[in-house]
Image: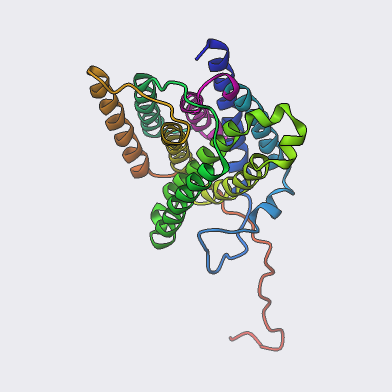
Amino acid sequence: MNGWAALVAVGAGGCFALSAALQHHAAHREVRDDVLAPRTMDPRLLIRLVRRPLWLGGRLAAVLGVVLQALALRAAPLSLVQPLLIIGLALCVVLEPRLGGDRADRQTLGAALLATSGLTVFMVVAEPGAGSGTLTAATMGVVAGACALAIAGCLAVARRRPNTAGAALGIATGIAFGLTAAVLKAGMGAFDDPVALVTGWALYAYLGCAVVALLLNQNAFLTGSLTTPLTAITLSEPLTALLIGLTAFQEHVDVTGPRAVLMLGGLVAMAYGVHRLAGSRPTAPSPPVSTRPEPTQNPSRSPET
């Protein structure tokens, strides 16, 4: 992978970091429609969020990130571009608390740094190589089906164990983002032919995956502090991209000799960092202001004396 593509991928990670910070800050100003009986997913959340300028600013940053991501994917393998986006985790963990006039605590920063460093070591040592770069609709259907099953499992865990909802929804979001990147990579050739772009499957598959990923992402941001869901997203997205790259795009990694030991060490560091993040005490968000009318007291009832 050339230096230009790496720089563009890091720039995309920075845009995604700004987007996540702004959207998380906006999401915590919202209130679910089902306050009395909260669910794992609130499908009407996006309709309310589009009315918030802060959230729209986050979406603009995300669009710029997607453009930079697409440019990087044209010049480099999927399994190399996606891991570089982990720069967004470190940036966002620092940036988001400052939007509320606060700072991220040292334990959170240390755990996030350990997790991202472990993943970085794993991906650099693995050194994925370029594959075919093309994907048929049938193959993509199989990949999408496998990802859908994994996402459904995460949603089931989030519903049954609310205390792990942030991590579970974050993993589901990362899987959806990894699938979205794979569809983007597969459809890169269609962008050179407008007719093929409109009549082909890649554009519509990308839009569908993007909407699902966005909905999962915003609901993950409602579960508590930003750190847990964002870390889960940042770790599961490149791992999903790596698996799709190795299986569907026929990319390859070198696991011979000392590389295997270093890769194992990276995975251990990553797992321990995620464990520390899951055990860290989340920053309590400011309570959202409910738009529900308050019950009024019956004026005909005289107060007790």
Residue ID at (62%, 37%): 22
> What secondary structure characterizes most of the magenta part?
helix
> Does the segment drawn in magenta span residue 105?
no
Which quadrant holds the C terminus? bottom right
Q: Position of residue 213 (x, y in %)?
A: 57, 45
Q: Position of residue 132 (x, y in %)?
A: 50, 26
Q: Is residue 43 above or below residue 84?
A: below
Residue ID at (48%, 44%): 143
Q: Position of residue 137 (x, y in %)?
A: 57, 43
Nearer the observer, 54 or 175? 175
- Can residue 115 be seen? yes
Which stretch did the figure color magenta?
73-102
Q: Is residue 176 above or below residue 268?
A: below
Quarter-of-image position of residue 270: top left
Q: Is residue 34 left or right of residue 242?
A: right
Q: Position of residue 122 (x, y in %)?
A: 34, 25
> Does the segment drawn in magenta span residue 90?
yes
Nearer the observer, 97 or 215? 215
- Can residue 11 be seen? no
Residue ID at (62%, 58%): 43
Residue positioned most to the top = 3
Nearer the observer, 87 or 126? 126
Q: Is residue 5 left or right of residue 255?
A: right
Residue ID at (30%, 26%): 266
